[in-house]
Image (cartoon, grey):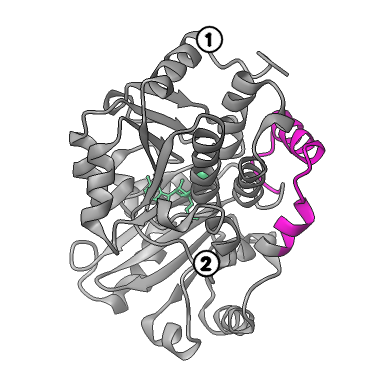
Amino acid sequence: MNEAFGIPKDKLSKLEEIIDSAGRIAVLSHMNPDGDAVGSCAAVASFLSEVRGKDVTVVLPNAPGAPLDFITKRIPKEKLLIHGEDPEAAVKAIGEADAIFVLDLNRLDRVSGEEDALRSAKAPKVLIDHHLGPEVEAFDLVFSKAEVSSACELIFQILMEIVGDAKKLPPTCAYALMCGMTTDSNNFANSVFPSTLRMASALLEAGVDRDEIVESVFNSYRINRIRLLGHMLDNCLQTTPEGAAWMILTQEIKERFDFRDGETEGFVNIPLTSKDIRLSLFLTEEDDRFRVSVRSRKGTSAREIASRFFHGGGHENASGGRLLIPEDIPSKSDAGAYVEKATKECLK
Ligand code: 5GP
Ligand code: MN
């Protein structure tokens, strides 16, 4: 399997140098961390601490939702800092690190509140990511590849170049890599490359229990989430003749269904199971804004609408961003009209 993934040798040597000369390492990922973000952090932290004996701290901007607990709990509690809960400790860990790994994001502003600490940190910064257009100038070493399912897949490829065999990965590392790949590919529905299946095969052979991961990701929600989904589809789904669909989760509905973070994961994909829809948006009301998730069918760009209308970006068919009040719309009740106009512009 060595050399099969085309990771440049000079980058691997530089990576080894950075790891060798570091005692304390900080591992970071993006705001509203998803399975790939948490899986990437858990995998890299496991490898660097268990195989390389480093003192590793994972720093996330906000806490992963409860549905991701099965991965989050693979990071030792005392080694996980949440910037939103303890900003001083998070900034200190970044400032004191001898090396910083940034995973599953392409622009530093995606780490939200830790951005200044990250930009001003003196330690070498390593980016491992699968989004287009990485902010290369902010890093000392960049591993960036869009032709993979997930950041976890690219991390797997790098680790295979280093250790040569998935069976040599610590169980936590192997498990976390499979988690991130499974969630980002939506259980092998999107962004599956030959290398993705080779990774899955190697990790299965190494003993990862994929059934447990699938149960944890897709079949472990609270019943409220199913009722909320029913409500959203029945009462909130809007569609246009051009093939757009959107739903808006308001504060009022959140309260009615005792909504908890992470419970709408996957809702945005559902309209795309209709042949009449090629662009789907899901908006979640937050304090002074809406968080926006966008998905599209091949041939329609989710990234275009996210970057043109929602201050965001991401992948061609899976993107995200935000809708700001009052910058974008005067009040929350104008969100639907704004989304309708944006989809009309993009589906012309
Ligand atoms: P989700 O809809 O699952 O929150 O996000 C889907 C994808 O869109 C993420 O994997 C990420 O690549 C991208 N994304 C989400 N929010 C943002 C954002 O605010 N800015 C950028 N550049 N990308 C985002
Ligand atoms: Mn990802």
| In magenta segment, residue 100 | no
Q: Residue lying furthest front in this view?
A: 53
Q: In the drawing, does residue 37 fall left or right of residue 89?
A: right
The tag on residue 9 is: 1
Q: Is any atom of residue 239 visible in this view? A: no
Front residue of this view, candidates 126 and 107: 126
Label 2 Cα neighbours within 10 Å, binned few <14 / some 14-19 / many ≥20? few
From what the image shows, is residue 329 above or below residue 37? below
| Quarter of the image with the N terminus in it | top right
The tag on residue 240 is: 2
Query: Is the residue indicated by label 1 positioned so its CB lies within 8 Å of ligand 2?
Result: no
Q: Position of residue 49 (x, y in %)?
A: 50, 37
Q: Main secondary structure of the magenta part?
A: helix
Label 1 Cα neighbours within 10 Å, binned few <14 / some 14-19 / many ≥20? few
Residue 81: image quadrant is bottom left
At 51% across and 29% down in the image, what residue appears? 52
Q: Residue lying furthest bottom in this view?
A: 256
From mark 2 to mark 1, how far is it between C-alphas? Answer: 50 Å
Q: Is any atom of residue 319 visible in this view? A: yes
**Span colored in magenta:** 189-215
At 42% across and 87% down in the image, what residue appears? 255
Closer to us: mark 2 or mark 1?
Answer: 1
Query: Is the residue indicated by label 2 positioned so its CB lies within 8 Å of ligand 1?
Result: no
Q: In the drawing, does residue 313 fall left or right of residue 51?
A: left
**Dots 2, 1 in contact, CB < 8 A:** no
Could you say whether the residue bearing mark 2 is in a helix, strand or loop? loop
Q: Position of residue 99 (x, y in %)?
A: 34, 30
Q: Amino acid at mark 2?
A: Thr
